Image: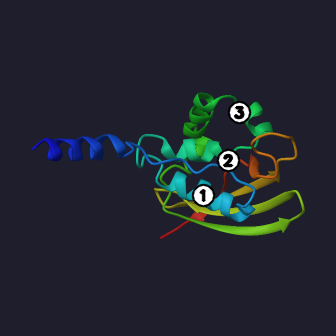
């Protein structure tokens, strides 16, 4: 019985309550950064409330973080009408516009949860400053949504 209790204890306390957030590394390609962010926003509240927003924040460039403020402010911004269409969206397509040595430009076509289609300009830069993010691709800017059409 004691062995059984020990096994149950180990299982309960060694299993993380929440999934681990993916962290930026220098080997993640620019398009993959955008995929990680959009896929996370698509299921924002899984495995916990605002997990998608937190994952997106992980790949926000230090200059973007300075502009948007701490995670709490970033979360409020994501719930504002201009960006809330990204939360729990149905579908997205990532179109590479231009890839340079240190900057990448994408156009995103996104279908919101209510079927509306929007476009976003998504810009990434490779971090040049020394530190934990050096040489990582991270998001520097996302435009406000541009209405495209309504899907059927």
> Disc number at residue 77?
none
In percent of the image, x 80 and y 67: which residue is there?
97
* Secondary structure type for disc 1: helix
Query: Mark 1 to mark 3: distance in Å?
Result: 20 Å
Note whether 97 is above or below 71 in the view shown: below
Q: Visible in this render: residue 148?
A: no
Q: Which percent across, then down, holds residue 49?
A: 43, 40
> Disc number at residue 68?
3
In percent of the image, x 41 and y 43: which residue is there?
48
Question: Among all residues in the image, which is located at the extreme left?
Answer: 1
Note whether 106 is above or below 11 in the view shown: below
> Disc number at residue 36?
1
Rate crowding at label 2 as few (under 14), some (14 to 19) or many (20 or more) other CA atoms within 10 Å: many
Q: Visible in this render: residue 127?
A: yes
141 relative position to 18: left or right: right
In percent of the image, x 15 and y 47: which residue is there?
4
């Amino acid at each position: 019985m004691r062995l059984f209790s020990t096994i149950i204890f180990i299982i309960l306390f060694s299993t993380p309550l929440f999934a681990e957030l993916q962290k930026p590394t220098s080997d993640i390609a620019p398009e993959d950064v955008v995929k990680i962010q959009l896929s996370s926003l698509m299921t924002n509240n899984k495995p916990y409330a605002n997990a998608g927003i937190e994952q997106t924040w992980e790949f926000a460039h230090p200059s973007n973080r300075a502009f948007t403020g701490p995670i709490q402010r970033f979360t409020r911004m994501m719930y504002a009408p201009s960006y809330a269409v990204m939360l729990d969206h149905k579908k997205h397509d990532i179109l590479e516009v231009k890839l340079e040595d240190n900057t990448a430009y994408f156009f995103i076509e996104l279908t919101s949860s209510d079927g509306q289609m929007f476009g976003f300009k998504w810009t990434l830069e490779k971090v040049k400053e020394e530190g934990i993010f050096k040489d990582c691709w991270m998001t520097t800017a996302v435009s406000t949504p541009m209405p495209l059409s309504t899907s059927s």
